[in-house]
Image: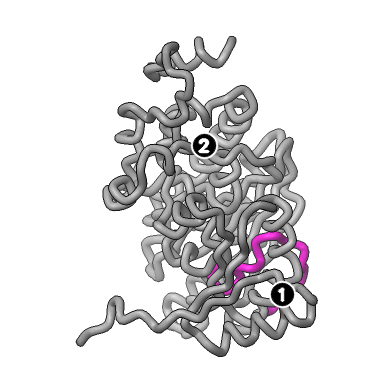
């Protein structure tokens, strides 16, 4: 089936008379309900042409989007029973995937974010106690959950953080048929202890409970956190990586039925659009740990520059200590001269006067 016929079925108004359909967004922009009206107002059609579904839904992207939709839906359906236990969750597809799909770059893997905060109450324990098998409860050290709830121990939060990653791993290992979980990493945010440093998402370590790695036709990394997606966005280094598809959220957002709805669930902030418009790779280390800064310099800068060779790399921020740390590492790597460092003034946004 050719792309024009496919778009006709999807009810997109494909105008044969238009020589450059990527500049004519017609009414399709109204479908991007997750984008702020201020963003749509601040950028003209030419700036936002990369969002045009007539361009995004090409012969290369359609099978990849269908694949991501299928696998993310499978994960979401596998976790639905948790809602009966009072465990709400959000699932987003984030990282480089949304950006690379929209900008027609090579897709290396799919990063999925699951925000899941397990309630500290006996109801959740009782519901899970009924649902989980004896083997799973033993492997998850489930009895400790009950003991910590009754004692209201300070260790409960740390236990549930690790428990959530182990629980998801067990569920997905049972539900997934063709895919295989090849790794699971629990992150101790307080101690910054990580056994295996081979996971691409570890630059977000201070926002995550753990990472589950799935071997598939396109490898999938699942980031598990009790933080919100917007909190994670703040901790991502490159502005051009601060975007996501909002796939599912308990009581608020149902999963997309097709790749069009999947595409229209896209979210990004002003920085993302500004970077594309002005062809800049902006990185702000203000919220990053020293370990994250080291990982960005050691691994991510070169990858981003290779993927976007015509973009100017800029390091910005108001935290002088973090800027200096970044500059020191850039000097060590002998790439400082190629990067523009801009120290901005601290913002008063959000402060009470």
Find residue 166 and report its horizontal and vertical position in percent. 62, 60
Question: Can residue 350 be seen in this snapshot?
Answer: yes
**How far apart are labels 1 and 2 at the CA level?**
45 Å
Q: Check disc 2: other Cα within 10 Å, few if <14, some if 14-19, many if 20+.
A: some
Q: Is residue 199 part of the magenta span, yes or no?
A: yes
Mark sitting earlier along the chain (1/2): 2
Instruction: Please state which of residues 136 and 206 is positioned toward the viewer in this rendering.
Output: 206
Q: Please name the residue shown 43% across and 52% down the image.
A: 268
Left or right of 59 on screen, residue 334: right
Question: Can residue 142 be seen in this snapshot?
Answer: no
Residue lying at the far left in this picture: please name it: 353
Callout 2 secondary element? helix
Report the magenta residues as a range. Answer: 193-209
Find residue 345 and report its horizontal and vertical position in percent. 41, 83
Residue lying at the far bottom in this picture: please name it: 321
Left or right of 279 on screen, residue 339: right
Q: Please name the residue shown 37% across and 38% down the image.
A: 45
Find residue 66 and report its horizontal and vertical position in percent. 57, 29
Q: Check disc 1: other Cα within 10 Å, few if <14, some if 14-19, many if 20+.
A: few
Q: Please name the residue shown 34% across and 46% down the image.
A: 34
Q: Please name the residue shown 54% across and 56% down the image.
A: 240
Residue 210 tag number:
none
Residue position for label 1: 337
Residue position for label 2: 73
């Amino acid at each position: 089936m050719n792309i024009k016929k496919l778009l006709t079925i999807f009810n997109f108004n494909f105008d044969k008379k238009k020589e450059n359909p990527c500049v004519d967004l017609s009414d399709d922009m109204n479908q991007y309900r997750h984008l702020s009206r201020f963003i749509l107002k601040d950028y003209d059609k030419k700036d936002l042409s990369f969002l045009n579904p007539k361009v995004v839904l090409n012969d290369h992207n359609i099978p990849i989007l269908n694949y991501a939709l299928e696998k993310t839906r499978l994960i979401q359906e596998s976790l639905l029973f948790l809602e009966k236990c009072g465990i709400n969750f959000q699932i987003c597809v984030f990282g480089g995937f949304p950006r690379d799909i929209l900008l027609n770059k090579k897709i290396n893997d799919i990063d999925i974010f699951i925000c899941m905060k397990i309630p500290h109450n006996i109801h959740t324990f009782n519901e899970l106690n009924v649902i989980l098998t004896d083997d799973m409860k033993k492997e998850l050290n489930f009895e400790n959950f009950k003991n910590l709830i009754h004692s209201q121990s300070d260790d409960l939060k740390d236990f549930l953080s690790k428990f959530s990653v182990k629980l998801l791993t067990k569920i997905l290992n049972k539900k997934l048929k063709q895919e295989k979980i090849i790794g699971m990493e629990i992150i101790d945010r307080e101690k910054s202890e990580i056994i295996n440093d081979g996971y691409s998402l570890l630059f977000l370590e201070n926002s995550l409970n753990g990472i589950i790695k799935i071997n598939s036709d396109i490898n999938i990394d699942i980031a598990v956190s009790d933080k919100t997606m917007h909190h994670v966005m703040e901790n991502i280094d490159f502005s051009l990586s601060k975007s996501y598809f909002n796939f599912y959220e308990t009581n608020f957002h149902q999963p997309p039925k097709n790749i069009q709805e999947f595409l229209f669930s896209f979210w990004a902030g002003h920085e993302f659009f500004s970077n594309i418009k002005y062809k800049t790779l902006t990185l702000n280390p203000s919220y990053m740990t020293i370990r994250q800064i080291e990982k960005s310099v050691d691994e991510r800068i070169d990858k981003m520059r290779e993927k976007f060779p015509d973009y100017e790399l800029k390091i910005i921020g108001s935290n002088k200590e973090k800027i200096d740390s970044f500059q020191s590492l850039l000097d060590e790597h002998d790439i400082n001269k190629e990067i523009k460092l801009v120290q901005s003034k601290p913002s008063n946004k959000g402060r009470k006067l």
